């Protein structure tokens, strides 16, 4: 038995609780009704994942977010340092993105995103971060606490951490010190990596082989579609591929996989990156990963042939669609992104009862 198979077999022995305390159905153990919605899992962190979730909740009611836990800046970093907890910030943002468009949902989205302004210790702490950490301390269970917050907010989906262990992101960066542009050094911490003026060569996590949250692995294995990206490429997207059990699930799942590219290079982390270079660095970190679709904004791809060639190495087709806001900012429009995902799911999905 291979290491990958044994890891997944061990994780499948866990029957995670679903919403409301009900045990989740085992993989393949439930006959889906014709017309049921696709089961979608979105992986990422920060504002990129929030954009995907705000779009996906418009087209499916069976949605799970798996979120990075390597943030070490701002309110999350302070809570992590002081209390030894997972950084809650990206989890909070995902929950806010899943809030409904009604008054209840939008009120709670604003509340959990609210940051205190003071001269004291509460300055810049987000209400949602404190709520999440308080429930972690009360319940002693990351997943149960996040499910409870989701229930309070009326979230249209589930939010899970990718690991129950706080992680440190480290990167090999060329020219991090502008005075030594050819030197490659190790840069530590997600906040520092995201803003490096140098060229990121590769990233890894500390601890090196962190355990995945079993519910996250099960969600990937049981999905119809897995969505990776958009988001900070090295600090929010690629880290999911560095958690062995999660990568194993991504390689084994029968779900189709769509990679959603960013609208523009990120200053610092991916400065000067072309769309195809994003794929190249993804492949370096997960050489065995296969994709079905690469989604990109049509206005953000100057060289379509090169992107098509890069996608073909993953076994993927390229879908170009207008998904950016029309105000000129490099942000996704949730309605346009939802329409693009919906079209991809219908055109590229296997024939199934949810189509």
Image: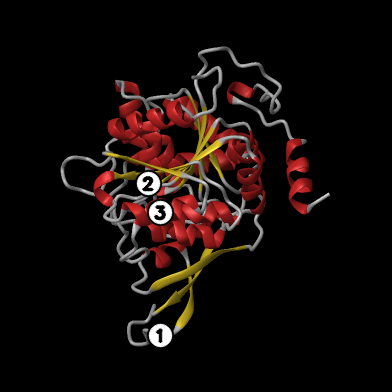
Please indicate, yes or no, whether residue 76 appears anywhere in the rendered image.
no
Q: Are marks 3 and 1 in contact (CB under 8 Å)?
A: no
Please name whichever residue, 337 or 103, is drawn nearer the observer in this view of the structure.
337
Closest to the camera, between mark 3 and mark 1, is 1
Please name whichever residue, 46 or 268, is drawn nearer the observer in this view of the structure.
268
Tag 2 secondary structure: helix
Residue at image position (59%, 41%) is: 142
Location of mark 2 (residue): 48
Residue at image position (40%, 61%) is: 277
Q: Earlier in the sequence, mark 1 or mark 2?
A: 2
Location of mark 3 (residue): 75
Residue at image position (46%, 81%) is: 184
CA gap, disc 1 and disc 2: 31 Å
Residue 213 against residue 335 in the figure, above or below: below
Location of mark 1 (residue): 182
CA gap, disc 3 and disc 1: 34 Å
């Amino acid at each position: 038995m291979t290491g990958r198979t044994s890891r997944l077999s061990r994780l499948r022995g866990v029957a995670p609780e679903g919403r409301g305390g009900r045990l989740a159905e085992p993989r393949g153990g439930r006959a889906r009704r014709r017309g049921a919605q696709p089961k979608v899992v979105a992986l990422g962190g920060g504002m990129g994942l929030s954009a995907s979730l705000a779009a996906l909740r418009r087209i499916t009611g069976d949605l799970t977010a798996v979120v990075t836990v390597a943030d070490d800046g701002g309110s999350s970093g302070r809570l992590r340092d002081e209390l030894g907890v997972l950084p809650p910030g990206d989890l909070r943002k995902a929950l806010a993105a899943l809030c409904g468009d009604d008054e209840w949902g939008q009120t709670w989205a604003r509340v959990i995103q609210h940051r205190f302004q003071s001269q004291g210790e509460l300055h810049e702490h987000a209400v949602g971060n404190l709520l999440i950490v308080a429930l972690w301390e009360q319940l002693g269970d990351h997943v149960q606490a996040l499910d409870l917050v989701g229930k309070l907010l009326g979230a249209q989906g589930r939010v899970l951490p990718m690991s129950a262990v706080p992680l440190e992101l480290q990167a090999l960066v060329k020219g991090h010190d502008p005075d030594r542009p050819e030197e490659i050094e190790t840069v530590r911490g997600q906040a520092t990596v995201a803003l490096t003026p140098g060229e990121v060569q590769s990233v890894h996590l500390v601890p090196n082989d962190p355990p995945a949250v079993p519910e996250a692995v099960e969600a990937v294995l049981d999905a119809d579609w897995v969505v990776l990206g958009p988001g900070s490429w090295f600090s929010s997207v690629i880290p999911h591929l560095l958690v062995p059990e999660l990568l194993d699930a991504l390689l084994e799942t029968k779900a189709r996989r769509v990679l959603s590219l960013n609208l523009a290079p990120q200053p610092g982390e991916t400065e000067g990156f072309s769309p195809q270079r994003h794929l190249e660095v993804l492949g370096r970190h997960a050489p065995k990963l296969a994709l079905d679709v690469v989604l990109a904004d049509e206005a953000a791809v100057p060289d379509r042939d090169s992107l098509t060639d890069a996608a073909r190495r993953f076994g993927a087709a390229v879908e170009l669609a207008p998904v950016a806001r029309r105000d000129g900012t490099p942000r996704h429009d949730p309605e346009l992104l939802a329409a693009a995902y919906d079209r991809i799911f219908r055109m590229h999905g296997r024939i199934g009862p949810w189509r």
